[in-house]
Image (tube, grey):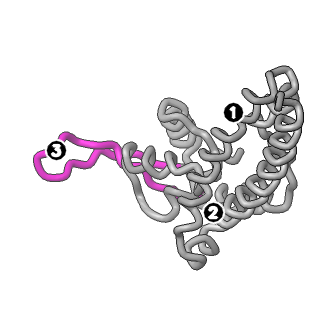
Amino acid sequence: MEERLLILGLLRSHAMHGYQLHEALADRAVTAVHLSKANAYKLLRKLADEGLVTASEEREGARPPRRVYRLTPAGEATFQTVLRTLLAEYAEPEFPAIVPLNFLAELPPAEGLALLRQRRAQLVTRLTSIAHMSEETRLAHLSLDYFHRIYQAELAWLDQVIARLDTTTSEESPR
């Protein structure tokens, strides 16, 4: 249902052609949903079949025609209903990236530590990209503020794990 809300919400702001929609969907920090290009088009067709969006061919200059999608009044009503439903519900988040943490002890300690440091570097890059945005921008898009805080908490936790493993690895290595 989040995917429907996302596409309806994006089209609510303004009409978009497929490429514009794909670009908006690509920023997972804002959308928080992974929706491939193929699945987005499939969902657009379904929303059109349901009368929630319309599609029209438009040509800009000498460019080939593009399908431009717009929200219908029924789409606006559905957006409002789905928005209220999803805001009122708590959905247990899924974190597939934490599954390997359960098996960290299966690796040699030094290797596990090196891999966690790689993971940390990637997390810092992601956190930095959001941290450089103004607080006003983050608060205007609450998903950005949410991810900013989640990444900060994850980084603090990961630093504790790395420090603990680093101490353990140091104690186990021959002197």
Q: How many marks?
A: 3
Q: CA distance from mark 3 to mark 1?
A: 48 Å
Instruction: Determine whether the residue tagged by mark 3 lies in a helix, strand or loop.
Output: loop
Q: CA distance from mark 2 to mark 1?
A: 27 Å
Can residue 25 be seen in the rendering of this structure?
A: yes
**Rendered-image quadrant of the C terminus:** top right
The residue beneath circle 3 is 63
The residue beneath circle 2 is 144
Rendered location of residue 68, percent (x, y)? 36, 49
- Magenta residues? 53-75
Q: CA distance from mark 3 to mark 2?
A: 35 Å
Disc 3 or disc 2, which is closer to the eye?
A: 2
Q: Relative to 166, does residue 27 appear above or below in the rendering?
A: below
Residue that extends furthest to the bottom in the rendered view of this protein: 136
Rendered location of residue 9, percent (x, y)? 57, 58
Q: Earlier in the sequence, mark 3 or mark 2?
A: 3
Instruction: Determine whether the residue tagged by mark 2 lies in a helix, strand or loop.
Output: helix
In this view, the residue in front, 170 or 160, is 170
Is residue 64 within the magenta segment? Answer: yes
Kind of residue at badge 1: Leu
Disc 2 or disc 1, which is closer to the eye?
A: 1
Can residue 73 be seen in the rendering of this structure?
A: no
Q: Are marks 3 and 2 in contact (CB under 8 Å)?
A: no
Kind of residue at badge 3: Arg
Disc 3 or disc 1, which is closer to the eye?
A: 1
Rendered location of residue 93, percent (x, y)? 81, 45
Q: Relative to 164, does residue 132 appear above or below in the rendering?
A: below
**Rendered-image quadrant of the N terminus:** top right
